[in-house]
Image (spheres, rainbow, N blue to C red):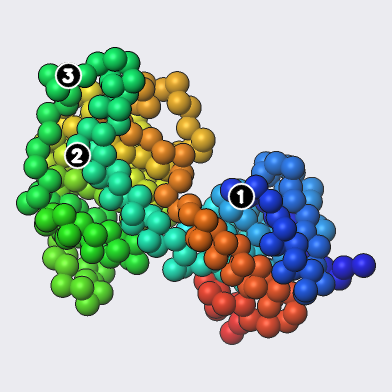
Amino acid sequence: MNAFTVLLTDRAWPDLELERRILAEAGAELLEAPDDSETTLVALSPRADAIATCWAKVTANVIDAAVKCRHIARLGIGLDNIDLSAASRRKIPVTNVPDYCIPEVADHTLALLLALSRNIAQFDRQARWGVYDLKHAWPMTRLEGRTLGLLGFGRIAQAVRKRALAFGLQVIAHAPSLDDRGTGCEMVSFETLLSQSDILSLHAPLNATTAQILNSARFASMKPGAMLINTSRGGLVDEQALWVALQSGLLAGAALDVFDPEPPDLSQPLFRDERVLTTPHAAFTSQESLLDLRERVCRQISSALQGARPSNVVNPEIYA
């Protein structure tokens, strides 16, 4: 009989063979939730010695019900779906994988940037409809020499900058610290970022300060005809305000990999506009990145269950 139970709230891969194998080495069995509703997770969490979550919300109610939980692991980078305060109050270590999927998200961001700039999706759709005529395309401008603005300047944004420079883009960035991380990137105020960016790419965490940071007033402050790319968190953008900005001509296009809520209501007019590209929260994905993520998180859980401090604890103050 296994000594421990690990509750998996949700996943984005087809099987759990890897997880079961690694956790079994630590004497743990895997319990997969049938859905990620709070009601279901509250009902299952009393059995959990550890909780692993991809996108499901691990709320204070879930954490409080997890009476024997000794570790919460985020299968990813961001922590906005975990009530960190509730976990810390219970002295439960929370971990993430901060250097996970950096090449994938950076590549995806550049792919969206190129697709927007070169009308790739529009041309493909029209060709499939039997339309082969440049007169039906949105206006295109030369990419070289345009300004890419990065909101946030962590690992992914730095990787995006490196790729963008190879295309001849000028890159500026804003982060609260205005720290260029030794890259030499021009760091600017948020206001300057909005007014100078031909393309604005979002790479900020979602928290109380950044929620809907791109709203009607911010869109009005952007460079006329600018484009928006979001591969970070859907909650950074007021989607209704984005739709209005596109309709009014303030923005020329948008590419979105993340939404609020997820999955989005694809019947909404925002997602039916040809100037809006959508991908299904796919930026993080590659065969290599998923295997790396799954194995590293299982090792974190195994360490915690065996009494060791797991890697990448985001609330280290609990050990004080």
Q: Position of residue 196 (x, y in %)?
A: 10, 49
**For the point 28% across and 20% down, which residue is it?**
126
Image point 29% across, 15% down: which residue?
Answer: 130
Count neighbours of disc 1 (C-alpha within 10 A) and say few if under 14, some if 14 to 19, many if 20 or more. few
Q: How many marks?
A: 3
Specify which label sits upstream in the sequence, 1 or 2: 1
Would residue 286 be found to the left or right of residue 192 on screen?
A: right
Foreground mark, 1 or 3? 3
Taking the spot 51% from the left edge, 67% from the top edge, the residue there is: 97
Element under disc 1? loop
Q: Position of residue 145 (x, y in %)?
A: 7, 51
Q: Which residue is mark 1?
A: 13
Instruction: Tell whether 98 sits left or right of 15.
Output: left
Whether residue 59 appears in this view of the structure is no
**What kind of residue is marked 1?**
Trp
Is 29 or 287 nearer to us in this picture?
Answer: 287
**Which comes before the other along the chain, label 2 or label 3?**
2
* Label 2 sits on residue: 117
Q: Is residue 103 left or right of residue 316?
A: left
Give the foreground label among 2 and 3.
Answer: 3
Decide: is 58 above or below 5: above
- Residue behind mark 3: 133
Check if mark 1's residue and mark 3's residue have beta carbons within 8 Å: no
Confirm or deny contact between disc 2 and disc 3 (CB under 8 A): no
Q: Residue at x 9, y 42 (%)?
A: 142
Residue 94 placement: quadrant: bottom right
